[in-house]
Amino acid sequence: MLPGLKICHDCGAKPGEIHKENCDVERCSVCGGQRLTCDCEGHDKEFARWTGLWPGEAEATLLGIDLNELARIGYERIFFIKPKG
């Protein structure tokens, strides 16, 4: 495992692995929200696999903001939606 990457604190998935069922960290590849609380059809578990970083952490860092700011400006979901096609 690369330095700085962590195991999912909820389901124990290692970086690159698919989250286990009912993981509260997994994001939905359809709506971008928390998979545990959505009913979207067509979710792709491979696309939503654990990266080793908290969801949005890398994106917020790249944008030069913190995770709370990412959510405040409404970007907390867009990075987790699988593009169509």
Image (cartoon, grey):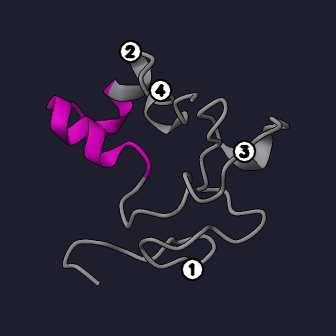
- Percent from the top left, x then y, of residue 75? 41, 23
Query: Which badge, 1 or 2, comes first in the chain's sequence?
Result: 1
Q: Which residues are magenta?
A: 55-69
The circle drawn on residue 73 is 2
From mark 3 to mark 2, how far is it between C-alphas?
25 Å
* Rendered residue at 54%/36% (across/down): 82
Q: Nearer the viewer, mark 2 or mark 4?
A: 4
Q: Is residue 84 above or below residue 16?
A: above
Q: Earlier in the sequence, mark 3 or mark 2?
A: 3
Residue at 43% from the left image edge and 34% from the top image edge: 79
Q: Depth check: 63 or 47 in front?
A: 47
Is label 3 in contact with label 2 (beta carbons under 8 Å)?
Answer: no
Question: What is the three-letter code of the residue carrying label 4?
Answer: Ile
Real-space Cα separation, disc 4 to disc 3, in angstroms: 15 Å
Q: Is residue 63 left or right of residue 6?
A: left
Is tag 4's residue or tag 3's residue first in the polypeptide sequence? 3
Left or right: 19 in relation to 76: right
Q: Residue pushed farthest top? A: 73
Main secondary structure found in the magenta portion:
helix
Question: Which one is in front in this view, the residue at disc 4 or the one at disc 3?
Answer: 3
Q: Dot 3 corresponds to which residue?
A: 43
Dot 4: element: helix
**Quarter of the image that includes the C terminus:** top right
Q: Amino acid at mark 2?
A: Ile
Q: Which mark is residue 78?
A: 4
Q: Position of residue 23 (x, y in %)?
A: 69, 63
Q: Secondary structure at mark 3?
A: loop
- Compute the Cα span from label 3 to label 1: 20 Å
Q: Which residue is mark 1?
A: 12
Q: Name the front one of labels 1 and 4.
A: 4
The 10 Å Cα crowd at callout 1, few under 14, some 14 to 19, many 20 or more, is some
Secondary structure type for disc 1: loop
